[in-house]
Amino acid sequence: MKKLKLLFLFIITIIFTMNGLFASTDGKDNKIKNKIFNFSSEKIDTAMSIEWNLSGQYLEKYENNSTLIKNPNLKLYKSNFSTNILSDTALDPTGEMIEIYLKNNVYINRIDSSNISILKLYTSYAIFYLSKDLVETDRDVTIITANSITTGSGLSANLESGIISVLSNAER
């Protein structure tokens, strides 16, 4: 009887151990691979010019290469313009800085070569496509330029060309 109880406990232990092993390989890639506090990073192009500079409170890189950034401050540099992008959190789903999902207190400020703000955008959520210089949101947005303030719901803004479309409820 004592051997039977030990055999039963041994089998139960093996079953729980195997379940624990299989549970860790269920396809969820949400484990943190790296976490960096008070970080700063920049991308330099082939001509040795800075394309962008990113800093923040912390950066979490996950096993699936997605990246979460707390209090990101992204500065993009183009030939005649620079763009400052701030929010409470940002998610880069690929880790390649192709698109960034900005959440809570999103602020985008476009500055010309004489350091004058030519466009400010405020919203609660936005997607910024770096290669296209494009901002999109389906939330309420406020757009401030030198001569107007426009509010509305939803936005598609090509910052390179200056074409901004408010999707609905536009008011000046």
Image (cartoon, rainbow, N blue to C red):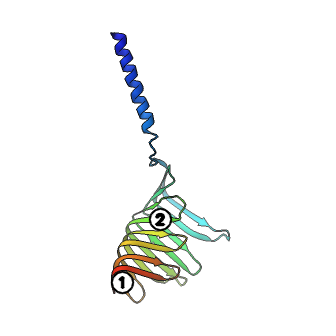
Residue 124: which quarter of the image?
bottom left
- Measure the alpha-carbon separation of dots 2 and 1: 24 Å
Few, some or many C-alpha atoms within 10 Å of disc 1 (few <14, some 14-19, many ≥20)?
some
* Disc 2 secondary structure class: strand
Q: How many marks?
A: 2
Numbered label attached to residue 150: 1
Instruction: Name the residue tied to disc 2.
Output: 100
* Disc 1 secondary structure class: strand
On the image, the x and y values in percent for residue 134 come to 49, 74
- The quarter of the image holding the N terminus is top left
Q: Is residue 64 left or right of residue 105?
A: right
On the image, the x and y values in percent for residue 45 come to 64, 68
Residue in the picture at 34% in, 10% down: 2
Query: Amino acid type of disc 2?
Result: Ile
On the image, the x and y values in percent for residue 151 come to 34, 81
Up-down relation of residue 96 to residue 144 (above or below)? above
Query: Amino acid type of disc 1?
Result: Thr
- Which sits in the foreground, 19 or 114? 19
